[in-house]
Image: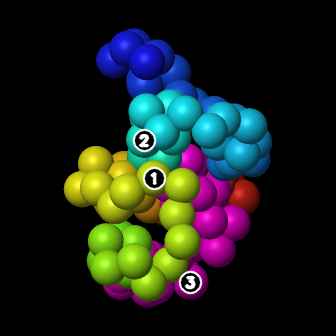
Amino acid sequence: MSGSASKDLSSLSHAELYLRRSRTTDPKEQEELAPAEHRAFAREFAQESPFTAAVSLPFAIPAYTAAKALGIVGARSPASTREMSQGFIGLLEGLREARRESQRKRK
């Protein structure tokens, strides 16, 4: 997938990306989809549960990546810093959106 394809992936939901990953056995495609899936998961979790995400994901994201790297958890793609950084980006996106929603409700 090209760089523009990667950018397009960032707008997909976690469910859509998870489904794409479950349908492919191509390791290259798994590696391309994994960062976007991690970003979407973190974004959606932070939107739905901002406090829980804010206190847990800063620890869970690197811990999961480390567990993958050490082979403690099974995974469809290898651990990567790109996957981890996309998780943090998703966390920030989700918290921003949760804040906007909260402000709209107050008005």
Checking the image for residue 77, the label placed there is 1
Task: Provide residue 14's location: percent of width, then percent of height.
Answer: 66, 48
Q: Which residue is mark 2?
A: 31
Work out whether residue 50 or residue 87 is closer to the camera in this orientation and state it: 87
| Residue drawn 45% across the image and 53% down it | 77
Amino acid type at circle 2 is Glu
Question: Around disc 3, counting alpha carbons within 10 Å, would you say few (fewer than 14), some (14 to 19), or many (20 or more)?
Answer: few
User: Which one is nearer the viewer's eye here, 45 or 16?
Assistant: 16
Relative horizontal placement of residue 1, taking residue 11 as reference (left or right) = left
Residue type for callout 1: Ser
Regarding residue 78, the answer to whether it shows in the image is yes
| Secondary structure under the numbered disc 3 in the rendered image | helix
- 63 is within the stretch colored magenta: yes
Mark 1 Cα within 10 Å, few/some/many (few <14, many 20+)?
Answer: some
Whether residue 61 is in magenta: the answer is yes
> How much space separates mark 2 and mark 1, taking CA atoms?
6 Å
Mark 2 lies on a secondary structure that is: helix
> x%, y% of residue 67?
38, 80
Q: Is residue 2 above or below residue 16?
A: above
Q: Are marks 2 and 1 in contact (CB under 8 Å)?
A: yes
Work out which quarter of the rendered image holds the C terminus and state it: bottom right
User: What kind of secondary structure does the magenta stretch mostly adopt?
Assistant: helix
